[in-house]
Amino acid sequence: MQIENFKVIYRILNILEKAMDYDEFDMNSISAETMKISEARWIKLMMLLSKEGYIDGVIIKQSLDGEYAMSVSSPQITLKGLEYLEENSLMKKAAKLAKGIAEII
């Protein structure tokens, strides 16, 4: 996966985490257009996030001809998704610290 995919994944999870404070979720906040990616890439990333257990509220069905159909109804971040955000945040801080140490030396 390209680094851009991970940035989009992080952004989606971060938005879903912040949405935990609200009763209703605005799907436009994580849309393909908002993420500045193609609809096809967005669908695949949402499918990955759902399949890997990072989000709930996404239903994926495969037709007999192999095509996928996705239905998103009130997506929510899971505990695994929250852990991903935390680990990513800690890795970013460690990378910044390592860069700072390298610049000093």
Image: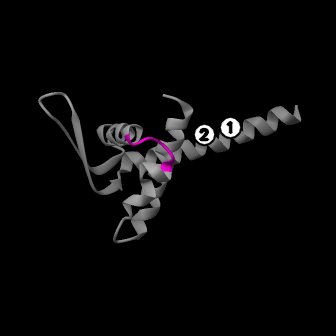
Mark identifier at residue 95: 1
Question: What are the residue bounds of the magenta stretch?
Answer: 35-39
Residue at 40% across, 64% down: 20
| Mark 1 touches mark 2? (CB < 8 Å) | yes
Residue at 60% across, 40% down: 91
Q: Is residue 20 left or right of residue 88?
A: left
Residue 75 lies in what quarter of the image? Answer: bottom left
The CA distance from mark 1 to mark 2 is 6 Å
Residue 88 pos. (x, y %): 54, 42
The secondary structure making up most of the magenta span is: loop
Residue 64 pos. (x, y %): 11, 29
Residue 23 lies in what quarter of the image? Answer: bottom left
Residue 79 pos. (x, y %): 37, 50
Q: Is residue 38 left or right of residue 105?
A: left
Q: Secondary structure at mark 2?
A: helix
Residue under numbered circle 2: 91
Above or below residue 24? Residue 69 is above
Residue type for callout 2: Met
For disc 1, the neighbor class at 10 Å (few under 14, some 14 to 19, many from 20) is few
Q: Is residue 53 left or right of residue 94?
A: left
Residue 37 is one of the magenta-drawn residues? yes
Q: Secondary structure at mark 1?
A: helix
